[in-house]
Amino acid sequence: MFQLTESDQHFLLQTARNSVRSYLAGETPRTSEPEPGVLREPRGIFVSIHKGGQLRGCIGNVHAGGPLYRSAGECAISAAVGDPRFMPLTTAELPFVEFEISVLSPIERVEHIDKIQIGVHGLLVSKGSSRGLLLPQVASTYGWNCEKFLQETCIKAGLKPNDWKDGATIHCFSALVFSERQFHLSATT
């Protein structure tokens, strides 16, 4: 399983918050360059923003689009202002939100659903031009079993709940998930 040091996790969380802060202030986000290593490697990543324990935005890339540290900033800005499910985040809200980052493993095709592990795997279900993804922590948060997880991923894709049984392609992945909360970071850190 892919690992990051606590220092690397702090760096990515600060990059996410600082990128959003700069963007909302009308400034060009400036990301400091990390030392050569894992943060410069391309990885899939999702940034989730929570406010009062509720999702406020979540955007990411299943496939690596560039260095991990740069993707953290880009996805954070997109989650803050580009998630179509929510109004754009405001500067006034920024001190009251929490950033969570999920660094993804490569995706793998699921041949048998009994291989899906709740709390370990996230799902990507696709059929035709429809595609839906749910991160590993979603099924655990809601107490879903495997079938419910598959159904909800289909719904996220705009499909019928049981389309996973009828011609859909199922992929899974794992994620290293960390947040400002677990490190007791605040908006001013």
Image: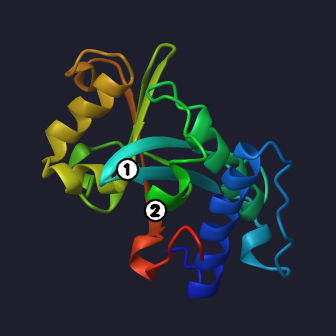
Q: Which quadrant of the rendered structure holds the C terminus?
A: bottom right
Say if 155 sits above or below 26 in the image: above
Q: Secondary structure at mark 2?
A: strand
Q: Give left or right: position of 119 versus 184.
A: left
Residue sitting at 67 percent across and 75 percent down? 11
**Residue 40 figure quarter:** bottom right
- The tag earlier along the polypeptide, 2 or 1, is 1
Q: Give left or right: position of 173 versus 54.
A: right
Give the number of the disc on residue 122. Answer: 1
| Residue 185 coordinates in the image, percent (x, y) | 50, 77
Q: Are marks 2 and 1 in contact (CB under 8 Å)?
A: yes
Within-10-Å neighbours for mark 2: few <14, some 14–19, many 20+: many
Residue named by callout 2: 175
**Residue 45 figure quarter:** bottom right
Q: Give left or right: position of 134 versus 155.
A: right
| Residue 91 coordinates in the image, percent (x, y) | 61, 46
**Foreground residue, 181 or 90?**
90
Say if 115 sits above or below 62 in the image: below
3D distance between C-alphas at marks 2 and 1:
8 Å
Say if 152 sits above or below 105 in the image: above
| Residue 187 coordinates in the image, percent (x, y) | 55, 67
